[in-house]
Amino acid sequence: MQLIWLRCDLRVNDNTALSAAAAAGPCVAVYLLSPGQWLEHDDAPCKVDFWLRNLAHLSQALGELNIPLLIRSADHWDQAPEVLLELCRQLKIDAVHFNEEYGIHESQRDTAVTDTLQGEGIAVHRYLDQLLFRPGSVLTKTGTYFQVFSQFRKVCYERLHHSLPGLVKAPRAQKPVKVASDEIPTRIEGFAPPTEHLRRMWPAGEVEARRRLDSFTDAQIDHYQAERDFPAKPGTSQLSAYLATGVISPRQCLHAALQSNQGEFESGKVGAVTWINELLWREFYKHILVGYPRVSRHRAFRPETEALAWRDAPDELAAWQEARTGLPIIDAAMRQLLETGWMHNRLRMIVAMFLTKNLLIDWREGERFFMRHLIDGDLAANNGGWQWSSSTGTDSAPYFRIFNPLSQSEKFDAQGVFIKAWLPELAGLNKKEVHNPDVGGLFGVADYPPPIVDLHASRARALAAFKNLPPRQSAGGEHGY
């Protein structure tokens, strides 16, 4: 009997470990509930709910293949070896199959499980599935992990031209086994269920993920490069939550994008090329997790930036978290996050720079808050984005590049459509006033606060803080981390 251990790969199609396990013999699937670990990792309640809803869909799909889905509990991942070993003994499992995950705790968990099971004579098979390239296979000429995205992307393109990762066929139905599927829980203690509105925004299941991918690559991808920065437009794929949970694979996304662009990576439709670029950014940040494990430990990628004199400003942090900064584009973006579990990517950069530069509050506060609210929360991408915005990370914005939220607002939401959608109290303002109601004394908007910070003075404060840093260090070693 084969056991497939499911994690962030909640799909039947193009699932490397599932297909391999089913090909090797009669197969049973298991998913571990680990609420204690999820809380420690700041996983959002809406994301945990999304996992459960997708598990319910997956259980049905696996049931049609006569593959039972079992649910077991391992509150923390250090319990996973014991829980899986007990299950293997019960079911007389010959081999366990799972897809690789990245991040320091995931790696430690998987190594411990592998050692325990192999020690009992149970074979363990691990597969590349969450990424296009195995970490450690895309390296500089000196054999180190890339720190600059453009150089990483160039090597990826060369590799893709040589050999495109293929899609894995879904397993065929097997003969029924004498194991019954477990009921999928609908909620987990410690994680409040999200609103029905949020659930409707993010329907679960592979069919929905595939529908979104097909809809995007059939039509919207041509306009992606031109429209992706405008939050009032439906310019993005809305696939991030499905990718983060593994309801769809990066290979499926890549193949669909290439199909829409006559097989081209670097030429042809600029929208498709730009979107493929975004898939490679996702790849890059996961490789960074493996090559530079300190980013999994809440440490800055650039060691010298650990010396930054971040401000302890709980009132300003709370105003940012609660969407009452007095800067409409910031507050509208934060309301979008709080109500939908998602934020437009351009807005993620704007609000992150505002927190880390204008308020000079530690990026880790923002990173944690995002993870606690994002349905697409992903350690690698979230950490990479926050460290880019705060100028502490790989390939990061130069410290003197500080977005002005007002000019960003005027450029990317010129008519104030996005702002008014999320801040209805500003609906009566014209397209000039809506970006900065404070000018001229709030224009009579009594229930909207004045800005909590002076943008020019706070910019100067941030520049001074960064100028005082010690010289840039190499990000190569792990000493002291």
Image: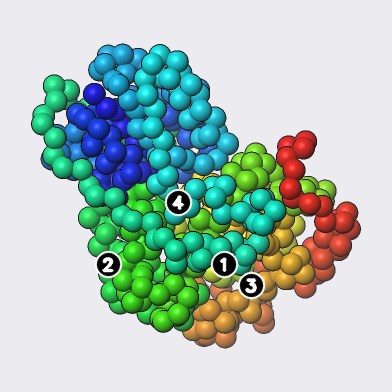
Q: Is residue 132 visible?
A: yes
Residue at image mark 1: 154
Label 2: how many residues lie within 10 Å, few (<14), some (14-19) or many (20+)?
some
Q: Nearer the viewer, residue 386 or 251?
A: 251
At numbered mark 4, what does the secondary structure look like: helix, strand or loop?
loop
Q: Which residue is mark 4?
A: 131
Under circle 2, the secondary element is helix
**Amino acid type at image mark 1:** Lys
CA distance separating discs 2 and 3: 34 Å
Asked if 223 appears above or below 131 in the picture, the reply is below
Q: Earlier in the sequence, mark 1 or mark 3?
A: 1
The residue labelled by disc 3 is 405
Can you give x and y, in whole percent of width and height, for residue 228 in the image? Answer: 46, 74
Q: Position of residue 352 (x, y in %)?
A: 62, 60
- How crowded pointer 1 is (Cα within 10 Å; few <14, some 14-19, many 20+) is rated as few
**Rendered residue at 57%/47% (across/down):** 136
**How many angstroms separate mark 1 from mark 2 (CA)?**
27 Å
Distance of label 4 from label 1 (alpha carbons): 17 Å
Residue 362 image position (x, y, % from top left): 71, 50
What distance separates the C-alpha of mark 4 from that of mark 3?
34 Å
Report which residue position mark 2 lands on: 214
Chain-order first, disc 4 or disc 3: 4
Quadrant of res 227? bottom left
Looking at the image, tell me whether mark 4 or mark 1 is earlier in sequence order: 4
Please state which of residues 191 and 6 is positioned toward the viewer in this rendering.
6
Residue positioned 27% across, 59% down in the render: 210
Q: Position of residue 171 (x, y in %)?
A: 20, 43
Residue projecting furthest to the left: 175
Amino acid on which the number 3 mark rests in the picture: Pro
